[in-house]
Amino acid sequence: MRNRQPLQFYSEPLPGVDISDFQGKLIVLEGPDAVGRSTQIALLRRWLEREGHAVLDTGMARSALAGKGIKMAKEGNTLGPITMTLFYTTDFADRLENEIIPALRAGFVVLIDRYIFSIMARAIARGEHRRWIEQVAGFALVPHIVLYLRAEVEPLVSRVVLGRGVFDYWESGMDLRFGPDKYESFVRYQARLIKALDSMVEPYDFQVIDASQPIPKIFRDLQRRIVRLPLSRMRPPRTAAKAEA
Amino acid sequence: MSLFVPNRNRGKLIVVEGIDGSGKSTQISLLSHWLRSQGYAVAFSEWNSSPLVRQTTRRGKKKEMFTPTTFSLIHATDFADRMESYILPLVKSGAIVCADRYAYTAFARDVARGVSRRWVRNLYRFAMHPSLAFYFRVPLDVALGRILGGRDALKYYEAGMDLGLARDVEESFRIFQGRILDEYEAMADEMGFHIIDATQSIEEQQRRMRDIVMKVLGDRLSNGVLHLPPGGDFSAQPTTPPVL
């Protein structure tokens, strides 16, 4: 899977979708639950907008088509692992075709909070075949950069307990009950997720960022990696501001 | 690599396939009633009927939001839910599950929509291999006559209007169904379909189906499949139950 160019399909072209002549950039943040992705996305978005870029940010279960359906399905107790995987893939496909691709065509910086890799990791952590889900998600576009916020399970536990104060049913993998209670299930399930994400670092060219650092330090690290991308087609920030003035 | 997951359970899975207007729904309904009358535990699962997914599908259709890819994926999601929470547990328990349309419908219809054959076949890899798959073969004009004669207006996706094949709905439907028919015919041998001539009378088709069921499954039906003790009463859910 080496030498894949950004904004090509991984393995399966989307029928009826033209991917030539994209001007935008596709930036993906990955990482387990409670690792601090949304904080960083918010910081990155503000920074990129100040720099004069048009930014779209999107994340899981936010599609017009399937977002509501996924939320409703998660409220019940009957959502099986394959169904969940495919529901999230539907959601991703809808956002890819209707939001991400048009934004890339228009030259946006697209910031994605979890890409297909989280869908794949969740499926793998639940015992589904890796080849199966890799092929199912093969219509995804290769991002310019995948930033993987990596943490061990223990700090995630403290973040959950100090933050929300309660273990989420799905983040604890309680649908498959990896342990006798939500804490133990969380620990085992998140360890499986991290293992699955780790296994993608090389084949999918993840850049690994140590998420145990303070928030500003992680942010600077992410910025450093993003400025190395050729963002040349975008409007230079100062002149853009001047032009508007 | 095999297409589906082999069925190593006591129960059986019988599926029917064919284009719209081939008469397959009538036939699987008659067959399931007959099997039930023989005392077998019979359940029924219809394409596109998952209580978890149905609303999303309905929304996408109403607002015409689907692309070939999302159309394919949402139907696979619906199928997965029925497989995981309904068909698989019942077949494991020893029931006969009758399915009106199966993964082959996606193989034919999604490919007719332009989705890659290889991709959609991989998508359904988790499906259980059916014990028996019937294909109702019918000439396009006969099926179209049945559909266009006695029914409400054709729906947008049903007629393949999303593909821009023709301005006229009936013309689009004709072209789209023709493509689906070609796909069915192309896979019939490979998939080991039992082919029923769907131009014959309803009774004759049903007789053929029952013969095949007895010939192929006969011994295994009396051996392992859940069966009612003589004189007992059978009250299974007739189809996918709603979420409580």
Image (cartoon, grey):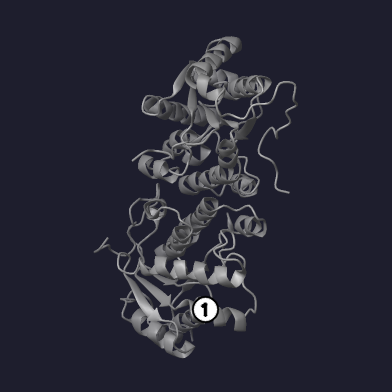
From what the image shows, is residue A244 above or below residue A135? below
> Residue A190 vs residue A22: left or right?
right
Q: Which residue sits at x=55%, y=41%?
A: B88
Judging depth in this view, the residue of A106 and A89 nearest the camera is A89
Q: Please, what secondary structure does the residue beneath circle 1 have?
A: helix
Judging depth in this view, the residue of A181 and A61 nearest the camera is A181
Residue B221: horizontal and vertical position, in percent? 55, 24
Residue B19: horizontal and vertical position, in percent? 51, 26
- Mark 1, other Cα within 10 Å: few <14 / some 14–19 / many ≥20: many
Q: Is residue B108 visible?
A: yes
- Residue B202 is drawn in which quadrant? top right
Q: Which residue is mark 1?
A: A156
Quarter of the image that includes the N terminus of chain B: top left
**How many labels were placed on the picture?**
1
Residue type at numbered disc 1: Leu
Residue A85: horizontal and vertical position, in percent? 50, 55
Q: Which residue sits at x=74%, y=31%?
A: B235
From what the image shows, is residue A137 above or below residue B184? below
Provide the chain ID for the residue under circle 1.
A
Residue A90: horizontal and vertical position, in percent? 51, 53
Q: Is residue A108 visible?
A: no
Q: Which residue sits at x=56%, y=29%?
A: B224
